[in-house]
Image (cartoon, rainbow, N blue to C red):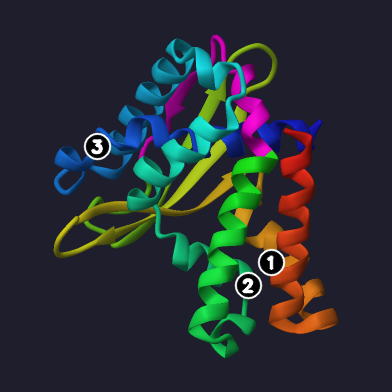
Amino acid sequence: MKRNLLTFVTQLFLALAVSLGFASAWAADEAPDAFVKRISNETLDAVRSDKAIKGGDINKIMQLVDNKLMQHVNFRRMTALATGPGWRKATPEQQQRLQDEFKILLIRTYSGALTQINDQVIEVKPLRGAVDDKNLVVQTEVRGKGEPIQLDYRLEKTPGEGAGWKIFDLNVLGIWLVENYRSQFSKEINAGGMDGLIKSLSERNRSNAKKT
């Protein structure tokens, strides 16, 4: 049961690609909880109205993620945290290959769950901590049929050009995405080093591609 919920809400995170592309003008000055509430509602509305995504069009989903989502996610930090100490020992080429394979893995693994978005609504809980904190967690609940689903976003505030909030982790029912993958990646690195992890992810991605 928890695995199914993790699948759904992780894809909801990926589905932010649909709405985050509209967020750049707001993000720099927007409060973190208001940011999450707005983009969550925009995401649900956009997904419900997009027949291609509802139909599971993996190419359109990947295009949206590349063009819209990645500029609002610190995916390098997310990948580094998931990789653990091995990240610092990896070459720049290995780091880039790992980011690429990890992104494809997330998109392909969870793309089918978009078809499950129907009557869900997002409730953003009162913000803990100060709004001027540079790193904080915004807690939400996904409400629909059945029990509410805990979905928390870990955000960082970035300065300079493109300033605003960036997502680098999320928590589903007490399970942080980064921590969940860190245990898997650690086993792969211990068995075959960084190249072994990259090879394993690449093989999983090729296998997933054959199923779509």
Q: CA distance from mark 1 to mark 2?
A: 6 Å
**Which of the marked residues, 1 or 2, is nearer the chain's N terminus?**
2
Q: Residue at x 58, y 35 (%)?
A: 11
In the displayed structure, 45 sits above or below 176; it is above
The percent position of residue 6, horizontal first and vertical second, equals 69, 38
Q: Which amino acid type is shown beneath numbered disc 1?
A: Arg
Residues at badges 3 and 1 in contact (C-beta under 8 Å)? no
Residues at badges 2 and 3 in contact (C-beta under 8 Å)? no
Indicate left or right for 92 with 144 as reference: left
Q: CA distance from mark 3 to mark 1?
A: 30 Å
**Which of the marked residues, 2 or 3, is nearer the chain's N terminus?**
3
Please state, as top left, top right, bottom left or bottom right, where the C terminus lies in the image: top right
Mark 3, Cα crowd under 10 Å, few <14 / some 14-19 / many 20+, is some
Residues at badges 1 and 2 in contact (C-beta under 8 Å)? yes
Q: CA distance from mark 2 to mark 3?
A: 29 Å
Of the numbered discs in the image, which one, if any, rests on residue 83?
2
The residue pinned by badge 1 equals 182
Q: Residue at x 49, y 31 (%)?
A: 60
In magenta, the rendered stretch is: 110-127
Q: Residue 86 occupies which quadrant of the picture?
A: bottom right
Of the numbered discs in the image, which one, if any, rests on residue 199?
none
Indicate left or right for 113 with 17 as reference: right
**Which of the marked residues, 3 or 1, is nearer the chain's N terminus?**
3
The residue pinned by badge 3 equals 23
Q: Residue at x 14, y 45 (%)?
A: 29
Q: Is residue 112 magenta?
A: yes
Q: Which amino acid type is shown beneath numbered disc 3?
A: Ala
